[in-house]
Amino acid sequence: MHSEKEIQISGSIPLQFPRLIQSVNPDEAAAEMAKLRKPNKSWIEQEPFQCTLEELQLTKGQMRYTVTHKDVPFECLFLPAKSKKLFVMLSGGRTPANKRYPLLLRWKYQNFLQGNVLCIDDPMYHFHGEFISVQWYYGTAEQSYLHLLTDIVKKVMAQQEIRAEDVVFVGSSGGGYSALYSANLLDHSSAIAINPQVILKDWQVPTVYDHFASLGIDLAQEDKFGRNELKLTNTTCHFFISFNYSSQNEWKLQFTPFLAMHDITPTFGISQHGNIITWINATDYNNPHSAIPTKTGIALAAYFLEAAKNGMDINTFNDFSLLLNEELHEKYEIMDKRDVIAENAKCIGKYFISMTNRLVKSILQYKLQMKAPASLQRFTENNFTLDASEHNAFNIGYYIGEQRILRYNMFCYKNKYFFRLKFDDFRQYVPEYKKVEAYLNSIRGTEISAWHYEADSTMIITVQLSPDTMEQQISAFIDVTFALLDNFLK
């Protein structure tokens, strides 16, 4: 079976499109897909080989390298492939949650991109690792680190016999800027940039401007390397740039001026403007700057670049790009919900241990005696089960043998926190349940928020929690419910 197939679009030159899998048999194809999803991780434990650019020699089995060029160390990862395609993966900024150095991004994409992968981290974090934001592989006033990085790429190309036409620089945010800049330096190469900064002085993070000022660099001034305002002047190259319209600050301060600078009329969806392909999408997210396509999106962007090089009319893909936009939007819609759940879980988890201990103490203190059925006798041992399988709730259950009696449950609903007691078969265990109901009615709205029956047998008592007094409310609620049970179960 051929490793590649030709795709013909009306009026275009046939494009060689790599096959991800070879088999069409469902069993074999599913196994191949499973293998594709398991990237080579053996490099993670590997010590980097230290060398200068002149000494760099890619060797079989060695994937991690620290390449020093003109006194600047570049942390590199090279994953070889049989293909003569090279994807250079560049990193963006750091966040308080992710300050790792080196940060080698998108290496897991290799199997889906069908090419060699070269990840290179930003050496600015070697020298200024304490700074939390983006640094663009900038360098110093007198030295451009992206020029040095391009020298490393050329050395890898020479050793692997890879043409510039088959080199694609890839990055998002600060890495997107660096991908565009690097491709612009290397004739006939390409770049994929997702939500890149392009006018550095207008990036809306004040600490960045101050940080560079402390290094003697004014991002608002013209730079001799053309770094502060990115202009794509190399007509031998091809550029794929994705902009998220939902990120309005970037749209106004970065994307719109950039498009005007290149005489490009903003067109929603995917469109081609000479050697520049733009994909303007609208993907909502709590941080729209971070709403970026992953390996499938990058693979499709690489396909569009090849299509443009082969003379295809990229504008014919516009309707298809709208479907891609919707897929991306749905992904980040789910992630938005996940983020809310994670925050809820963090708040709930804060009280998990103390609440568990409090409940155990209460059970021991009251030593509830169950009147019915007769087989249930007074108990003195604790039989707890903890259930935290849900991300936005946890449950503590109390059992006698296999019979569940009580459940305490804390959960979040519509950004409000609740704590409740569930008593299974309440009327069976509490003959004077009508007195209990009357008592609960008397404290509704004060000590409890509400009570009701579930499926005519399970008593549910609920209190809504305030974030400021959550622990005190939980403790008081446990006292109320156990005092209630103690009184009416005697």
Image (cartoon, rainbow, N blue to C red):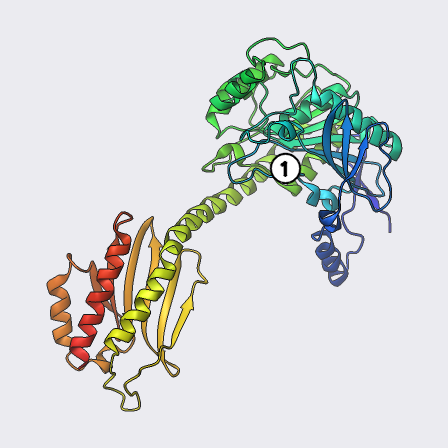
- Residue 454 drawn above or below residue 330: below
Residue 251, image x and y in percent? 51, 23
State the quadrant of the C terminus: bottom left
Q: Is residue 241 something one can see in this rendering?
A: no
Q: How many marks?
A: 1
- Residue 230 drawn above or below residue 467: above
Q: Quadrant of residue 352?
A: bottom left
Q: Residues within 10 Å of mark 1 (few under 14, many from 20)?
A: some
Q: Is residue 384 something one can see in this rendering?
A: yes
Q: At label 1, which amino acid type do we have?
A: Tyr
Q: Quadrant of residue 75?
A: top right
Residue 34, image x and y in percent? 71, 57
Q: Nearer the viewer, residue 178 or 483?
A: 483
Q: Is residue 367 left or right of residue 347?
A: left
Residue at image coords 56%, 43%: 327
Q: Is residue 448 left or right of residue 316?
A: left
Q: Quadrant of residue 291?
A: top right
Residue 402, image x and y in percent? 39, 82
Residue at image coords 31%, 82%: 380
Residue 5, image x and y in percent? 82, 43
| Residue behind mark 1 | 101
Q: Is residue 156 left or right of residue 378?
A: right
**Circle 1 sits in a helix, a strand or a loop, which is it?**
loop
